[in-house]
Image (cartoon, coloured by chain):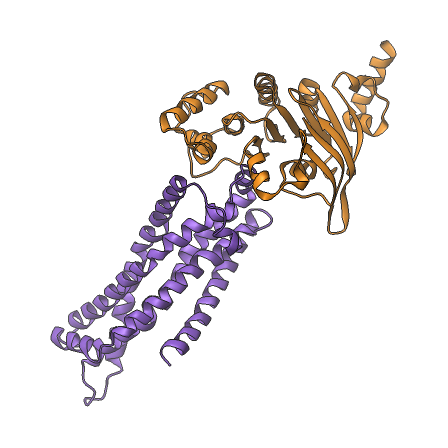
Amino acid sequence: MLQKVFGKFTKWSVLKSLIFKDIEVLIIGSLGIVSVISFFVGGVVAIQTALNLSNPLIPRNLIGYATRQSVILEFAPTFMSIIMAGKVGSYITSSIGTMRVTEQIDALEVMGINTLNYLIFPKIIALLLYPFVITLSMFLGIFGGYVASVTGGLCSSAIFIEGLQIDFNPFHVQYAFIKTTLFSFFLATIPAFHGYYLKGGALQVGKASTTSFVWTSVVIILANFVITQLVLA
Amino acid sequence: MISVKKIYKNFDNTNILKGISASFEKGKTNLIIGQSGSGKTVLLKCLLGLYTPEKGKILFGKDSLTDMKEKERRMLRQEMGIVFQGSALFDSMNVEENIMFPMKMFTDKDDSEILDRVNEVIKRVDLTNSNDKMPSELSGGMQKRVAIARAIVMNPKFLFCDEPNSGLDPRTSILIDNLIHEITKEYNITTVINTHDMNSVMEIGENIIFLQNGEKEWEGSKRDIFKTDNKPFIDFVYSSEILKKARKALKTNS
């Protein structure tokens, strides 16, 4: 499949408009949900960390530190990708799957179009912008933690910011982006595979969306383990 | 002209097409008819190159589809227009965008030239003032018209229609049949229609191929239908007892 995705290219003017359309749907369309989830999960991480700091010898700046590490290392790149597997992945599977069952893909084939390139390549390119979504997620997650800590009286603004700055390793951000870039490829290709090779009718479109979500999540989790072993261990 | 020479197609060790040979003539409406499961759609998909037969040849003029390389096949496909059973319009595009899609894809014409041609075919299929409508806003008959417009916008040499009347009322079916027939004559193209609608057969059947269990059982024109004594074909055409009696009465009277 991948060989054909990068095989005979669709006319650039058509491909360009498809890429912009996919950026709008897959990236810009996801900003709302990503923002809301990131902000509140960041807040919850901060609150739970604070609630577990019962020992007065542990400094309160750990709240900022723990929020930063959780959000940058795992929450934004990995768990946001699993949420995106549900949102973006099921959209990709169901849109391509519907095109399959309504013979739209056959119509494209008959016109002599490389359908794998036409349908999947723009999605892979559009999702190359996915690390920007994760950047936003990191920022809002930490900001959510800050708001929850300060407004909830868990620690002062200065202490939270001090915690954010303790032992900051910029490589952790790079590690998060390496993961995210790989996950963006999974987010585009695994759901597309399930949609493209779908057989049957409307019921199978629903089933394929579920299957694609499960497989994308599993692959992301496994890849996360392997990358973490390779890069951080 | 398209010629099919002794083609065989199997699925899961079941023979779907069993050595079919047929000719589809230029400037005529060629109909493939038969019961559900007789192999009509498989034969049509073989002609379109979506299925590759295990044995036999499919010739477009002198060029063998079965021996073509992928690039030659793509070039040939650009000379084909197809109307799918469910119209297969692109949901995300409006009528105008659906019709201009093949031109945008395969020609270097500027937007105004493309739009002129699109409006020309829209007028030809009687869809004026529907340019901005989305497929979901159209009736079944209108969707078929858009599909026909999209199929002919590139001036194809071959037009394939898979059950063009499915889901349409009898009156709209006849209008669609007549539109396809007129277009075949106007553009002098080879049209192959896959149908089990006997109204279509009687209306526009210039060259009819009847399939049964993956074999060609009968071939002729709509005029030959009344003369034939081929039992499986008669059983298919005159499927109800009333029609059988009517035929008998007509034969006795004549």
| Quadrant of the rendered image containing residue A67 | bottom left
- Lateral position of residue B120 relative to residue A140, left or right: right
Residue sitting nearer the eye, A69 or B100 = B100
Residue depicted at 85% across the width and 9% down the height: B253
Residue depicted at 25% across the width and 69% down the height: A43
- Lateral position of residue A19 relative to residue B206, left or right: left
Question: Is residue A82 visible in the rendered structure shown here?
Answer: no
| Quadrant of the rendered image containing residue B24 | top right
The residue furthest top is: B254
Q: Is residue B5 above or below residue A146?
A: above
Question: Is residue A148 visible in the rendered structure shown here?
Answer: yes
Total marks in image: 0
Q: Quadrant of the C terminus of chain A?
A: bottom left
How far across and down, in percent of the image, does residue B203 sit? 67, 18
- Lateral position of residue B251 relative to residue A91, left or right: right
Residue sitting nearer the eye, A231 or B92 = A231
How far across and down, in percent of the image, does residue A168 sit? 22, 77
Chain shown orange: that is: B
How far across and down, in percent of the image, does residue B59 sit? 69, 33
Q: Is residue B196 above or below residue A205?
A: above
How far across and down, in percent of the image, does residue A100 sit? 54, 45
Q: Is residue B229 above or below residue B41?
A: above
- Lateral position of residue A198 relative to residue B31, left or right: left
Residue depicted at 20% across the width and 69% down the height: A148
Rendered hue of chain A is: purple
Residue sitting nearer the eye, B239 or A173 = A173
Residue depicted at 47% across the width and 34% down the height: B106
